[in-house]
Amino acid sequence: MKSTFALMASAVVAAAALPVAAAAQTSVTIAETAPVVTLNVTETVEAAPDMATVGTGVQTRAQTAAQAMRDNAVQMDRLVAALVKAGIPKKDIQTSGINLSAQYDYSNRDGQPAGPRFIGYEASNQLSVKLRDIRKVGTLLDTMVEAGATNVNGPSFSISDPAPMLAQARAAALKTARAQADFYAQAAGYRSARLVSLAESNSGGQPPMLVMAAARFKADSAPATPVEPGQVGSSVTLTVQYALER
């Protein structure tokens, strides 16, 4: 019995030791990872704009909502007709907002507190107009006012086809990123830098990149409203990563 028990105990001990021995023989090798430099590079290419966008519209007031809308429709039809007559195609004239709201007078008369006094309804109709001949922007602004526009805002200048400018900005950004990565590689004692990732965002010649100020309005003078289009820029921002290699 003693001999049998000793044999069984030895077998149990040996079996329990097997997983430990197997785990001891397992090894994990982690390859050396090259350092990575991350760069954010922005390049902008500027050019003269070939398109302007102007906001305009009319506001009318009346004692009833229906009358305010009717009066507004009459003035808006006159404004749109004037734009079309001036050579703006209908596809470049877009309604950007219509609003109707009750108007109240909150002033205190005779120094006595009083509740709001209803004074009528105000209707507004706003347009976004694309002008593809920027040499005529000033004249068209005056045409809008003469046709009954009660508000004008803009112009904002842009490039109708920013693709060529974006291509130039993209190439310049990549060249700059490469030069910076090579600099860091050499400065850190590495032989070269290898591109491992690239992401892009861009601004295609839109109003936020406007270089010059918007129009200087002088609608009450005889000459056309002076407008200086200046230049607009198309920007590309690259986020790139380069692995430094020995």
Image (spheres, helix red, strand yellow):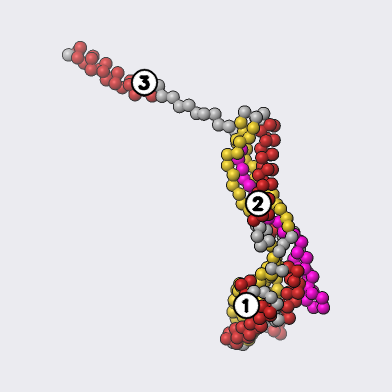
Return the disc, 3 or 2, that comes first in the chain's sequence: 3
Residue 200 appearing in the image: yes
* Dot 2 amino acid type: Ala
* Dot 1 amino acid type: Asn
Q: How many marks?
A: 3
List the residue tagged with mark 1: 125
Q: Nearer the viewer, mark 3 or mark 2?
A: 2
Q: Secondary structure at mark 2?
A: helix
Q: Nearer the viewer, residue 92 or 9?
A: 92
Left/right of residue 226 with respect to residue 184 in the rendered view = right
Is residue 227 magenta-colored?
yes
Return the disc, 3 or 1, that comes first in the chain's sequence: 3
Whether 20 is drawn above or below 102: the answer is: above
Residue 120 appearing in the image: no
What kind of secondary structure does the magenta stretch mostly adopt?
Answer: loop
Who's the residue at 67% across and 47% down the image?
Answer: 171
Q: Position of residue 232 (x, y in %)?
A: 72, 59
